[in-house]
Every structure is written in structure tokens, then in C-alpha cells.
Image: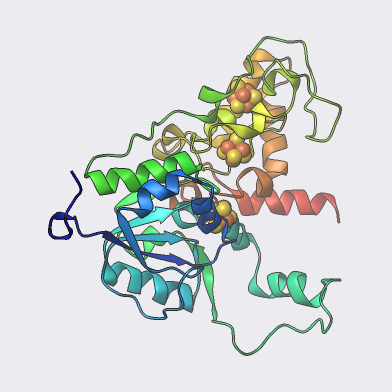
């Protein structure tokens, strides 16, 4: 029997907003492909930077916020989203942890502008813009330090299956199905004991396909990273760089840290010493902590000393 207009449920209204980010989380909506059609039947998008040209924030049931707070405009937009939406989802690693934008906390504004404009071979004037841009804030801030967040959906971007489930769970009024497993849980490689006694850089040699990267001397962050991606990187020959953010164990236990967890695991299955692994991760800390360093959950850990590690690394080049 066909549904009459009078019995049809009103659509769930949605606002989306992006703050300082790469726009990948918004593009990930399209990656839902035909599943998007299931969701579109039940929702109405009111404000969305890639679909609508609406500057204000209509009242909506759900607000999806991607990106970190880096500028005064970001802060204003986040606050407006909170005022206009019943439920706010921190969408993607930039919103949840500061993400890749958060790596800016280890550089001054002058250094960043110099790298992007002043000394960048792809710009013509080499002058930093002085008008038409929102003032930078001193730090990069995950959104829950500025507004209340109801649901966290990390990932860079989150796999469309997790986005679909998060939206569906809100539409159906249930908890999302997302698990607390690490990237290792879906990786098809096997951790084995080996005699490998040296850490390899990602580009050194060719890793064989069956065994865990850690067993082969490569640093893979899969075991300390939350699975919000279905493990595409290790499955396709690349080490996990941790873009979905740290596992709950690392986030919630003050003395657990990315580098010590990896060092404990890797030193047990290879002949590489724990200290050497810790030193290597500290040496390249800007890469290994790039997605979460702006988050207080990582930044306030007593063991997290990224500015000292970076200073030590830079001193080696002087
Ligand atoms: S989380 Fe990743 S994909 Fe999403 S906006 Fe940030 S950098 Fe882009
Ligand atoms: S550490 Fe990396 S390669 Fe090893 S099992 Fe986990 S995800 Fe796979
Ligand atoms: S495997 Fe690691 S680096 Fe690759 S998408 Fe997943 S979390 Fe990100």
C-alpha cells in the first residue's frame, strides 16, 4: 500500500559545516555511493558548504562538523552550529583531535605563512595575504574544547560504512555499531617472530606481503590506531600512519603512549631494542603524532614531549 502524504514522516534536517580541514570528510559522503540514496530519502540538508549557498544556520536536527578550530571564523561557525543543531557529530579526525591541521601547533604562525607563501615556489608574489582571511588563533583546537559534542566519528576521512552507520543510528534512534578495535583487527598480515635487528624507513626495500610490518622492521601504527577505515593501508602494502587517531587504551590511560606501545610490541617480535624504537619514533614524532598532537588527550600526557623531541631532531642538523 502506498504511503499517503499525511502519514509520511518529516525528514530529519541536517546542517554540515567545515572548519580548517581538507574537505575530504565532505567528499566521503559521496563515497557512500548508492547507500546515500537510502539516507537521502530520510533527510533534508539545509546548510552544507559544498551543496548550498546559505550563510546562516537554519535550525536542524543533526549537525556534522568537520575540521579543527584554527581561525576566528572556525570558532564562530562551530558555535553557530551548536546553537542551530540538536545533535552535533565531530566528524573526522580534524574535528575530533585537530587532525593533520593540528600539526601546526609545533610551528609559529610566521613559520607557517613563510612555508606556504613566502618561500613556496608555487606562489607568485611570495607575500602573505593581509586581507580577506580570518585571523589565526594561537593554537589548533579540536571542536569539543569549544562546543559540546554528542557523537565522535574519527577517521581521515571515516570510512563511508562508518558514516552511513552513524547517520542511520541517529535516524533510527540507536547507538552506532562502531567497535573499539584497532586497525590490526582487520589487517590480513600476521605478527611473527623474526631476527630483524634494524628499523627500516618506509621507503627502504620492499616489504613482503604476508607478515606484519613490525616483524619486518617497519613502523606501522595499526596496533595503536582505532579502526574507522577497514585497514586499507596495511592490506595494500602501506604502513598505517594513524590517521584515525589513537585507540581507546592509548587515549584513556595517561601513561600509555603511541611510542611505548609500539616499542613494547615490536621489540618482542624482532631483535630491535625497545630504546631504539622509542628513539626512532621520537626522532620522527611530527609524522607519528601528526593527527592527534593537538588533542589534549595526547598533548597532556606526562610522556608526550613533542617540542623537546623536535628540538633534539633539529639540533642534529645544525
Ligand atoms: S579528517 Fe582528514 S579527510 Fe577529514 S577533513 Fe581532516 S584531513 Fe580531510
Ligand atoms: S601492526 Fe600494522 S601490519 Fe601489523 S598487524 Fe597491525 S596493522 Fe597489520
Ligand atoms: S590504515 Fe591507518 S593510515 Fe590507513 S586509513 Fe586506516 S588509520 Fe589511516
Name the residue: 37% across, 54% down.
40
Q: Position of residue 165 (x, y in %)?
A: 37, 41
User: Eyeballing the image, is 65 above or below 274?
Assistant: below
Furthest residue in direction front, as rendered: 1
Furthest residue in direction bottom, as rendered: 131
Q: Quadrant of the C terminus?
A: bottom right
Name the residue: 51% across, 23% down.
185
Asked where in the image residue 168 lies, by quadrant, the reply is top left
Q: Is residue 23 left or right of residue 276?
A: left
Quarter of image, ligand 3? top right
Name the residue: 66% across, 64% down.
107
Asked where in the image residue 277 lies, by quadrant, the reply is top right
Q: Position of residue 94 (x, y in %)?
A: 51, 56
Name the residue: 78% across, 54% down.
314
Q: Position of residue 150 (x, y in %)?
A: 29, 53
Q: Quadrant of the N terminus?
A: top left
Q: Position of residue 153 (x, y in %)?
A: 42, 47
Amino acid at each position: 500500500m502506498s504511503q499517503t502524504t499525511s502519514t509520511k514522516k518529516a525528514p530529519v534536517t541536517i546542517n554540515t559545516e567545515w572548519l580548517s580541514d581538507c574537505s575530504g570528510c565532505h567528499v566521503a559522503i559521496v563515497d557512500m555511493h548508492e547507500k546515500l540514496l537510502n539516507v537521502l530519502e530520510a533527510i533534508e540538508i539545509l546548510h552544507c558548504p559544498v551543496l548550498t549557498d546559505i550563510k546562516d544556520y537554519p535550525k536542524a536536527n543533526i549537525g556534522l562538523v568537520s575540521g579543527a578550530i584554527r581561525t576566528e571564523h572556525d570558532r564562530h561557525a562551530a558555535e553557530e552550529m551548536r546553537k542551530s543543531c540538536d545533535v552535533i557529530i565531530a566528524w573526522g579526525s580534524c574535528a575530533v583531535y585537530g587532525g593533520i591541521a593540528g600539526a601546526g601547533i609545533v610551528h609559529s604562525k610566521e613559520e607557517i605563512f613563510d612555508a606556504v607563501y613566502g618561500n613556496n615556489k608555487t606562489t607568485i608574489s611570495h607575500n602573505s595575504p593581509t586581507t580577506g582571511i580570518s585571523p589565526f588563533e594561537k593554537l589548533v583546537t579540536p571542536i569539543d574544547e569549544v562546543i559540546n559534542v554528542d557523537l565522535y566519528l574519527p577517521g581521515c576521512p571515516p570510512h563511508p560504512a562508518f558514516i552511513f552507520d552513524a547517520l542511520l543510528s541517529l535516524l533510527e534512534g540507536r547507538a552506532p555499531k562502531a567497535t573499539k578495535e584497532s586497525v590490526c583487527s582487520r589487517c590480513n598480515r600476521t605478527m611473527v617472530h623474526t631476527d630483524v635487528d634494524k628499523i627500516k624507513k618506509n621507503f627502504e626495500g620492499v616489504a613482503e606481503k604476508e607478515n606484519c610490518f613490525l616483524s619486518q622492521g617497519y613502523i606501522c601504527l595499526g596496533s595503536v590506531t582505532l579502526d574507522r577505515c577497514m585497514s586499507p593501508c596495511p592490506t595494500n602494502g602501506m604502513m598505517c600512519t594513524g590517521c584515525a587517531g589513537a585507540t581507546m587504551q592509548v587515549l584513556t590511560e595517561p601513561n600509555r603512549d603511541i611510542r611505548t606501545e609500539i616499542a613494547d610490541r615490536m621489540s618482542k617480535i624482532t631483535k630491535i631494542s625497545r630504546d631504539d624504537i622509542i628513539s626512532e619514533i621520537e626522532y620522527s614524532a611530527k609524522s607519528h603524532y601528526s593527527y592527534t598532537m593537538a588533542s589534549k588527550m595526547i598533548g597532556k600526557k606526562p610522556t608526550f614531549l613533542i617540542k623537546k623531541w623536535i628540538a633534539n631532531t633539529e639540533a642534529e642538523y645544525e
